[in-house]
Image (spheres, rainbow, N blue to C red):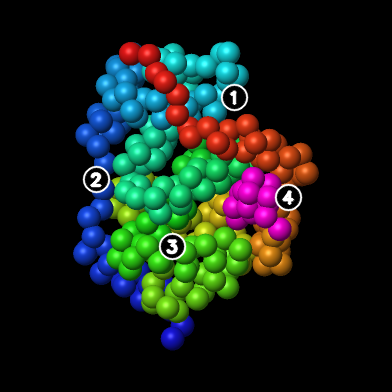
Amino acid sequence: MPLTMQLGISNAQKIIEQLKIEEMPQTFFELQEAMFAPHPNMVKIGDIIGKHPKLLGQFLGLVNQRLKRTSDNLILDAHAAVNLLGLKEIEQLFLLSFLSSAVPKNSFDQALVERSKRASLAAAELSYWVNDIGFSEAHLVAFLQDIGAIYMARAFGSDYLQDCIERQIHAPFSAYQQETLQYQTAHTYLGSLVVHRWQLGSLLSKSLLLHHSKDLQGLLEYDSRVAHMVALIQVANAIVEIDYYQQVPSAELQDSLQRSVAFLQLPDNAIKAASAVLAKWGQSGNSHKASH
């Protein structure tokens, strides 16, 4: 039967109750405490980030992408990085670093994460042409768009990723509807509930819930930032499939791209810029060796 949002959320909550959901690390809360201090100490913030070499490498890779550093001018130190970023960007990039390494548990998870990383690169670049969406929040939201699919796969088995998510790459609307009918919930509901549990903000939780919405104008009336973020995700996903993976787009994916580009009023050079970023950073793995 057709799925109502209330039923989808209720069924997603039942699934989550049976799963182990990763907790935010203590370091993240230490970082937030330092950033929310009346007079944030950037040295202390750099010290907190630098305590974990693995996360530091991921973080510095993202920072170098954010600042478009060339290979002969990379930032390799946490203190140098935090002095070049705003506090909100530091928080979001550190969170992205943690989730990139902590959530994937197997090859299926990792493949999904790698594709989402590429979509996040494209969405972040496209955010320059969208006034009310910041670079780092576009990066974070697009990266987390399919995190609910990881938890759906844990509940229903690895076939879920191939049966549902792979089809949705090429048919982002019709295949998503098939998922909701088959499971009476979807990765969108699980993802939204998970990031709500992590207290990561309404833009993220709403965008994850609605990122397969076809009615962008309807979303605009509901919440303009969510509408713009959903459109960014849809454009980014299409660019990754067409430009990075060199796949001939289905009619549905092509329609999604054209409608989202028109909705955001993106110029041709915006698409070219996102494609260029993917060509440069798409295989980087978002990681660099860091100094201590």
Residue 238 covered by magenta stretch: yes
Location of mark 4 (residue): 265
Badge 2: residue crowd in 10 Å (few <14, some 14–19, many ≥20): few
Which residue type carries mark 1?
Answer: Lys
Magenta span? 234-248
Q: Which mark is residue 68?
A: 1
Quadrant of the frame with the C terminus: top left
Residue 221 covered by magenta stretch: no
Q: Is residue 179 among what the camera can see?
A: yes
Q: How far apart are marks 1 and 3 (CA)?
A: 33 Å
Location of mark 3 (residue): 161
Q: Residue 23 carries which label?
A: 2
Mark 1 or mark 3, which is nearer to you? Answer: 3
Depth order, front residue of 34/180: 180
Is the residue 241 above or below the residue 7 in the image? above
Q: Residue at x 21, y 64 (%)?
A: 18
Q: Where is residue 289 in the image (x, y as percent from the top left)?
A: 42, 20
- Are dots 1 and 3 in contact, CB under 8 Å? no
Is the residue 11 above or below the residue 196 in the image? below
